Amino acid sequence: MSAPSSNPTAVTHEVTNQPPPLTGHDVADDPVFLEGVRREGAAWYLDELHLLGRRAGSEEVRRWAEEANRYEPVLRTHDRYGHRIDEVDFHPSYHALMDVAVGAGLAGAAWADERPGAHVARAAGFMVWSSAEAGHGCPVSMTYAVVPALRRSPDLAEVYEPLLTGRVYDPGLRAPAEKRGLLAGMGMTEKQGGTDVRANTTTATEQADGTWRLRGHKWFTSAPMNDLFLVLAQAPGGLSCFLVPRVLPDGSRNTFRIQRLKDKLGNRSNASSEPEFDDTVAWLVGAEGKGVRTIIDMVTMTRLDCVLGSASGTRAALAEAAHHARHRRVFGAGLIDQPLMRNVLADLGLESEAATTLALRLAGAVDRARRGDDGERAFLRLATAVGKYWVCKRQPAAVAEALECLGGNGYDEASGMPRLYRDAPLNGIWEGSGNVNALDLLRALAREPASLEAFHAEIGAAAGGDRRLDTAWAALKDELVLTEDAPLRARRVIERAALVLQGSLLVRHAPAAVADAFCASRLAGDRGLAFGTLPPGADFAGLLERLPG
């Protein structure tokens, strides 16, 4: 028998019916997103936002994101001679992502910008850029969040704030005054307490020179190569907040022993660590014994970024799903034209629009509260917990559904969807899990009646716009009354509060197709438990017109 012949002109494997990569596009070019940025007061930022969006959608940045997660941070506790150094090495692509983020003003720059809408602009940029890669957003977010807390000690703020609000990414451990820009982090939780930070065992002892010395072990401190950290420790007067620099003003290393890096589900590009303090030099921030009250200013801002990040991650996954469906054919027609896929994508688009609209509304409230609007400040107290709970809770389900739209292609690492899926649960845990935020809502209702009044005013602005919203709001008012079983039903209450708030925003600001479908499915309950179960009467064409990508 003769050997089989080979015909070099024969085509044995021709690739067809595969979508092109989703690159070379403007991530910011999304009507839902752009409408929100304009509405919340940052229209002046749109040209810069589109520049950032085009960069975020480039093939180069997609490669940076992949490399920053494939080549994870590496801890070096000692140098070759045995000296303790406690440094973490990152891939150059991580540094490239950070350089763009800080240079674009996504870290602390908004606090030094007096233009109305500065915090909305920063939030929009953060959403666009973190959609390319979420992990490096952690140090960016904490640097943004540290400024209001640090201002409780004006002498410290005077020294560090100019470098925290700059636009220069200057990595490496050196004396803060020698650097062109600083990054900040946070150390709250410990192994024996977790969320119960009042159970912390790290101790603080005051020194004759006005500094303090810390001794203890933190359980989950991200971005350990940042320059400064706000840390909780037990002082004689109670739990207090302290500023801990990695390098002291004289250039010597502060004691910040990194015991190990966490081996996490996602967020792999970002190093999260367990640092040990042993006679570590620190400065008191705020009043002694008021540590939680001081650091809560930082926590509130990082919770805002959790909402922004989850809305961004949901939108990024939806863009991939929509792009795939627009280019794929199945059963003789375009995938996006198949009735059931239209329902899935429309439902995901509805979820994404509600999340994006709420996230930008919160950013607008931060901006207006900073400029003295007490009503917006009161609104944030309640609405931040509501948004943090619900938008972060919905992200994993939405990303999973979007991944399924790509089928096996979505399960392949090359698609980028597995990374989006691994990253999805993080924001629901970071800065307070679902239960923490649900109980925080109850605390706001009990202690700050002005926050409920502001929430009433926000929902009331849509009164009469949709009977289903009016009915849901009337029922929620009864649920917001604190009774003995309030802690037991706190998740139910905060979920309904989130849906009513989103419904109010969409009734006022979204097209009729969006508002009607949201009120029918989320408030009146005319849907199933999975995505893709919108009622036949929904305006699918109108909903699909709002898809990104």
Image (cartoon, grey):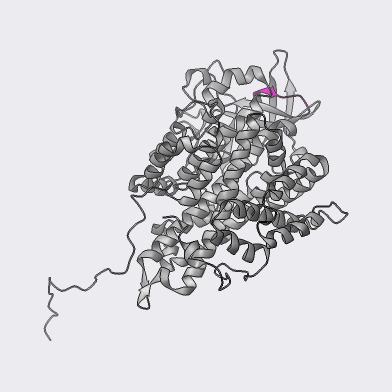
Counting labels gives 0
- Residue that lies at the very extreme toward the bottom in this rendered image: 1
Residue 142 in which image quadrant? top right
Quadrant for the N terminus, please: bottom left
* Residue 348 appears in view: yes
Residue 502, placed above or below residue 248: below
The image quadrant that residue 215 belongs to is top right
322 vs 460: above or below: below
Rendered position, 442 above or below 151: below
- Please identify the residue farthest to the right as the structure is shown: 484
Residue located at (52% from left, 33% from top)? 107
Residue at the image position 63 percent from the left and 39 percent from the top? 365
Tell me the quadrant of the picture where the C terminus can be found: bottom left
Task: Report whether 295 appears left or right of 168.
Answer: right
Q: Residue at x 47, y 53 (%)?
A: 316
* Magenta segment boundaries in residue numbering: 281-289
Viewed as shown, does residue 64 lie left or right of 546? left
Q: Residue furthest front?
A: 464
- Name, please, the residue furthest toward the top: 209
Q: Position of residue 368 (x, y in %)?
A: 62, 34
Q: Position of residue 84 (x, y in %)?
A: 53, 29
Asked whether residue 263 is in view, the answer is no
Front-most of residues 227 and 121: 121
Q: Is residue 392 magenta?
A: no
Q: Nearer the viewer, residue 69 or 28?
A: 28
Q: Quadrant of residue 147?
A: top right
Q: Position of residue 212 (x, y in %)?
A: 70, 21
